[in-house]
């Protein structure tokens, strides 16, 4: 079948939104069922958390790496490769006989992280300049909503079938989306010659593994053990080597020069902090409500009930993510970012101190969703408006990547804290969850302290081809 290159921007956007939604679902689809997977595959809490952490780690590296390859070989082709990686990863995960194979499958799925920067790049190439900012904001809201929707959908799927169908069903959906992308996504009109910085990719992978492994295993190894201290030291050294390699490279994986723009580095720092807080909540709030009542603090909720408790978070995230653009008439992107971070902080405090009532958790979840919706959309639009048009894809991809790195770090830290506080009968102690959500609240509060900056594109005066300000009508 020949490709259809005459696709309208609206059709192109629909396919990209479907691809982004399919991938973002994989972020959260397994989080409510980690206890179920742990029991079925006979593994530990610390190990099963790597089903999520490995995915985040893989996506952290794949996002900038595949984004660079897309610029060189074509965004349409790279999108197909990313979707194929998700589908194959889902197949392996669905038939995984043990947790090791499942983790490997999740690493393969993480290669689909290229969906985000490639989608933003295709929008930049195919849409009129005046519509790029609006389309990027809407796609960011789709990604945020998909990230939460997985938590709600997991329960009914597991209840009617079993946890392996959390991979069979996405595999089928992604296959259909890939066929649509092959037929409908136009070939990239612009390709940038250059080289892939494999050294930077290797160093990025190395320092993330060296950091995340001791963070998640320190409880078992001991914080003062040789393995823990050695790996953390290696992480610092490898991080410094990675920064040096990126700064000196003519083809950086993550452009540190762009990070000098005030609006870029401040927004990306918020992305790092809020990414950690967001995924900490996504991963461990469903686990909290599933803890048996015998613990004295859990509700013994099923996977479906856990998803329903998280439903207000999903609804408010979708609504306020979509309203972020129109709200710019009254609230600037910076104001929305600060309000969203503040609401996320308050909600995390509530999770820590008032988690003995389902209604209270649901209400706090709704507040957290409002914060997520505002932060997600405003972050992307602040980045898009801060750089020249030809850097839109790279800058938005960087923001997504930094948020994913924050998510992987936050998940590892929370997992370590919870496993460090064992309770009776092998269940986590309540104090582990309380401390974890206090840490997540602190991360949200730290995001509020990040200095704001005027729009960098205006200050730096890069070149006339800067994106126009987002207007409410364009959303």
Image: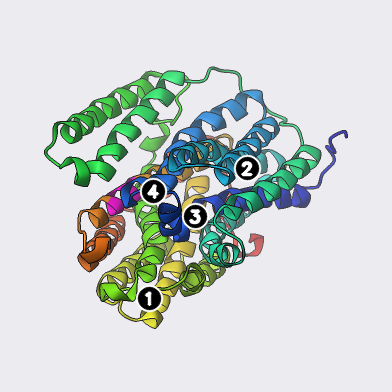
- Farthest-out residue, left: 224
User: Residue lying farthest right?
Assistant: 1
Drawn side of residue 200 relative to residue 119, left or right: left
| The magenta stretch spans residue 411 | yes
317 on left or right of 131 = left
**Label 1 crowd bin: few (<14), some (14–19), many (20+), radius 10 Å:** many
Between 301 and 198, the residue placed more toward the observer is 301
Residue under label 3, please give it. 30
In the image, is residue 231 part of the stretch drawn in magenta? no
Which residues are drawn in magenta?
409-415
Give the residue at x 30% y 79%. Answer: 356
Q: What crowding class fits label 2: few (fewer than 14 Cα within 10 Å), some (14-19), or many (20 or more)?
A: many
Res. 48 mark: 4
Secondary structure beneath dot 2 equals: helix
Q: Which residue is mark 2?
A: 119
The earlier-in-sequence mark between 2 and 4 is 4
Discs 4/3, front: 4
Q: CA distance from mark 2 to mark 1?
A: 34 Å
Q: Can see residue 133?
A: no
- Residue underneath mark 1: 361
- Give the x, y percent position of residue 39: 41, 55
């Amino acid at each position: 079948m020949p490709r259809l290159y005459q696709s309208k921007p609206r059709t192109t956007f629909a396919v990209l939104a479907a691809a982004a939604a399919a991938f973002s679902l994989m972020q959260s689809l397994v989080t409510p069922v980690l206890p179920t997977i742990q029991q079925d595959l006979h593994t530990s809490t610390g190990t099963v958390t790597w089903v999520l952490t490995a995915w985040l780690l893989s996506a952290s590296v794949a996002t900038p790496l595949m984004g660079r390859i897309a610029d060189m070989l074509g965004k349409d082709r790279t999108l197909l490769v990313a979707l194929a990686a998700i589908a194959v990863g889902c197949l392996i995960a669905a038939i995984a006989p043990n947790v090791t194979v499942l983790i490997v499958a999740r690493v393969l799925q993480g290669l689909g992280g290229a969906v985000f920067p490639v989608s933003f790049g295709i929008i930049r190439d195919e849409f009129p300049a005046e519509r790029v900012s609006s389309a990027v904001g809407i796609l960011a809201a789709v990604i945020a909503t998909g990230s939460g929707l997985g938590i709600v959908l997991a329960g009914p799927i597991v209840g009617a079938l079993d946890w392996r169908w959390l991979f069979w069903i996405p595999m089928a959906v992604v296959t259909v989306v890939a066929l649509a992308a092959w037929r409908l996504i136009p070939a990239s009109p612009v390709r940038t010659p250059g080289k892939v910085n494999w050294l930077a990719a290797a160093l990025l992978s190395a320092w993330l593994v060296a950091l995340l492994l001791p963070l998640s295993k320190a409880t078992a190894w001991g914080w003062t053990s040789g393995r823990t201290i050695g790996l953390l030291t290696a992480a610092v050294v490898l991080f410094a080597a990675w920064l040096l390699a990126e700064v000196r490279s003519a083809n950086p994986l993550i452009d540190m020069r762009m990070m000098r723009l005030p609006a870029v580095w401040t927004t990306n720092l918020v992305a790092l902090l809020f990414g950690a807080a967001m995924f900490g909540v996504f991963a461990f709030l469903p686990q909290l409500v599933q803890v048996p009542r015998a613990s004295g603090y859990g509700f013994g909720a099923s996977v479906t009930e856990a998803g329903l408790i998280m439903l207000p978070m999903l609804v408010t995230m979708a609504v306020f993510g979509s309203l972020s653009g129109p709200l710019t008439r009254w609230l600037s992107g910076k104001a929305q970012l600060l309000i969203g971070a503040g609401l996320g902080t308050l909600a995390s405090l509530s999770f820590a101190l008032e988690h003995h009532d389902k209604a209270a958790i649901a209400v706090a979840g709704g507040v957290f969703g409002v914060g997520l919706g505002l932060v997600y959309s405003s972050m992307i639009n602040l980045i898009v408006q801060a750089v020249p048009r030809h850097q839109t894809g790279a800058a938005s991809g960087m923001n997504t990547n930094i948020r994913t790195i924050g998510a992987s770090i936050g998940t590892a830290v929370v997992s370590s804290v919870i496993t460090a506080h064992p309770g009776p009968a092998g269940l986590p102690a309540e104090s582990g969850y309380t401390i974890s959500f206090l840490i997540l609240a602190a991360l949200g509060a730290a995001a509020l302290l990040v200095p704001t900056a005027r729009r960098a594109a205006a200050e730096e005066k890069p070149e006339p081809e800067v994106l126009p300000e987002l207007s409410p009508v364009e959303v």
